[in-house]
Image: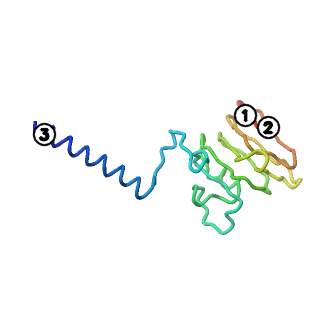
Amino acid sequence: MKKIIFSGIVIGFLFTVSIFSVAVFGLKEIDKTQGIQIHGIPIANIYIDDDNVQGPWDGSYKYPYQHIQDGINSALDNYTIFVFSGIYEENLIINKSIKLIGQNRESTIIDGRYIDDTIRVCSSFVKISGLSTHVHSLQLQELQKVSLTK
């Protein structure tokens, strides 16, 4: 009986400490499988923000990459890359199965500067949504399940 009471006290204490830690120190780690949002921004593996001009750049929410291609290069298959609103002057080569999600189709723009293809998709199972291009050039090689949505 004493073991059960002691176990209940220990579990209660640990639960109280964990709730207190989150309340005081904030949520440090977020389970990305739960679909939680940070300030209305979807959880992603990699973040991109053209406003982060001084670095550091590690692709995290706190230190997003400045360029989309940097995020693609560091991504693994099945990663989600979230792109904050801005004008990104670059040409993209997507050679991995990723989700590339823009914050807002009207304000997340890829400007290819009339150089080659604005976006070249070289991998299957790619989803692109929430962004637009100024120079409309998209090359899709013989791929499966490439999704372009608004």
Query: Residue 37: percent from the left, percent from the top?
Result: 56, 45
Numbered tag placed on residue 9 in the rendering: none
Residue 60 vertical position relative to residue 79 in the rendered view, above or below: below
Query: Residue 128: percent from the left, percent from the top?
Result: 72, 40
Query: Residue 55: percent from the left, percent from the top?
Result: 63, 66
Q: Work out whether mark 1 precedes mark 2 in sequence or the reverse, and give the earlier one.
A: 2
- CA neighbours of label 2 inside 10 A, class few (<14), some (14 to 19), many (20+): some
Look at the image and name its color scheme: rainbow
Figure label count:
3
Circles 1 and 2 in contact, beta carbons < 8 Å: yes
* Residue 43 as seen in the image, left or right of residue 66: left
The amino acid type of the residue labelled 1 equals Val
Residue 32 vertical position relative to residue 86 in the rendered view, above or below: above
* Residue 106 as seen in the image, left or right of residue 51: right
Whole-angstrom CA distance, mark 2 to mark 3, is 64 Å
Q: Residue at x 19, y 41 (%)?
A: 7
Query: Residue 14: percent from the left, percent from the top?
Result: 28, 48
Q: Secondary structure at mark 3?
A: helix
Whole-angstrom CA distance, mark 1 to mark 3, is 57 Å
The amino acid type of the residue labelled 3 equals Lys
The amino acid type of the residue labelled 2 equals Leu
Numbered tag placed on residue 3 in the rendering: 3
- When asked about the image quadrant of residue 87, the answer is bottom right
Disc number lying in front (1 or 2): 1
Numbered tag placed on residue 146 in the rendering: 1
Disc number lying in front (2 or 3): 3
